[in-house]
């Protein structure tokens, strides 16, 4: 989905189109029944997932009142009846376990959110996180290596957009984004 389709707010974060496409692919939602979006912002990930998979139950967690308003407006705009909005802050909210969890930011609680996510993931569930700070990337990778996860996949995504400049054009770079995807250990008996 094009970023321009979403209602936006000045200080409300949104996972951009290219990053969202990679994150949704890494979540492997084709087999999932429940997705949790931590810090949903405008709802771009939650809404696109809900539209791509109409039988998917999506829980969007957001703490920012301005973001909550935009999230609700965007859900209404796209008629996403399968998105439930929770006003609150992970890891302080209680939700049902999920097959996939997306985290687009950590609000300074990265390791607690990783632990919360792994606790709320069903065995075999997917966790996908995006970061722009290298410190968060390294902290997450270090923490995940000590957790019950398999196949940690990490990519750096660099995107530039063709932009007019005077009588010509150039590729305007966006911030590089790190994308981590992993899977919670399945229980083998």
Image (cartoon, rainbow, N blue to C red):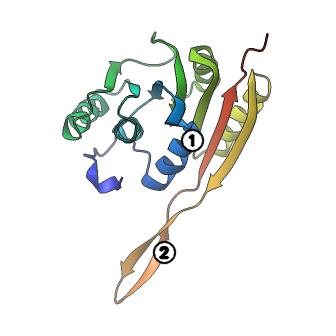
Q: Residue furthest bottom?
A: 167
Residue 127 percent coordinates (x, y):
60, 30
In this rendering, the answer to whether 181 lies above or below 170 is above
In this picture, residue 70 sits left or right of residue 88: left
SS at badge 1: strand
The one nearer the camera, 142 or 152, is 152
Q: Which disc is residue 130 wearing?
A: 1
Residue 80 percent coordinates (x, y):
27, 33
Which of the image's four quarters has the C terminus? top right
Quadrant position of residue 121: top right
Other residues around mark 2 within 10 Å, as few (<14) / some (14–19) / many (≥20): few
SS at badge 2: strand
Confirm or deny contact between disc 1 and disc 2 (CB under 8 A): no
Query: Which residue shows up at 28% across the image and 46% down it?
Result: 8
Q: Which disc is residue 56 wearing?
A: none
In this picture, residue 115 sits left or right of residue 29: right
Query: Which residue shows up at 64% across the image and 18% down it?
Result: 115
Q: Which disc is residue 171 wearing?
A: 2
Residue 53 percent coordinates (x, y):
40, 36
Q: Is residue 134 visible?
A: yes
Other residues around mark 1 within 10 Å, as few (<14) / some (14–19) / many (≥20): many
């Amino acid at each position: 989905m094009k970023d321009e389709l979403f209602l936006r707010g000045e200080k409300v974060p949104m996972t951009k189109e290219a990053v969202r496409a990679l994150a949704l692919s890494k979540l492997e939602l084709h087999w999932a029944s429940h997705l949790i979006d931590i810090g949903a912002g405008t709802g771009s990930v939650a809404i696109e997932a809900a539209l791509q998979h109409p039988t998917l139950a999506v829980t969007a967690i957001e703490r920012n009142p301005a973001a909550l308003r935009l999230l609700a407006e965007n859900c209404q705009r796209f008629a996403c009846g399968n998105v439930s909005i929770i006003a609150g802050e992970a890891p302080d909210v209680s939700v049902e376990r999920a097959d996939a969890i997306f985290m687009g930011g950590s609000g300074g609680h990265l390791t607690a959110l990783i632990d919360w996510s792994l606790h709320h993931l069903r065995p075999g569930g997917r966790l996908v996180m995006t970061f722009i700070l290298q410190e968060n990337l390294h902290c997450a990778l270090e923490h995940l290596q000590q957790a019950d996860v398999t196949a940690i996949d990490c990519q750096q995504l660099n995107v530039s957009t063709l932009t007019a400049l005077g009588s010509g054009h150039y590729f305007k770079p966006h911030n590089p984004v790190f994308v981590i995807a992993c899977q919670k250990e399945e229980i083998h008996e």
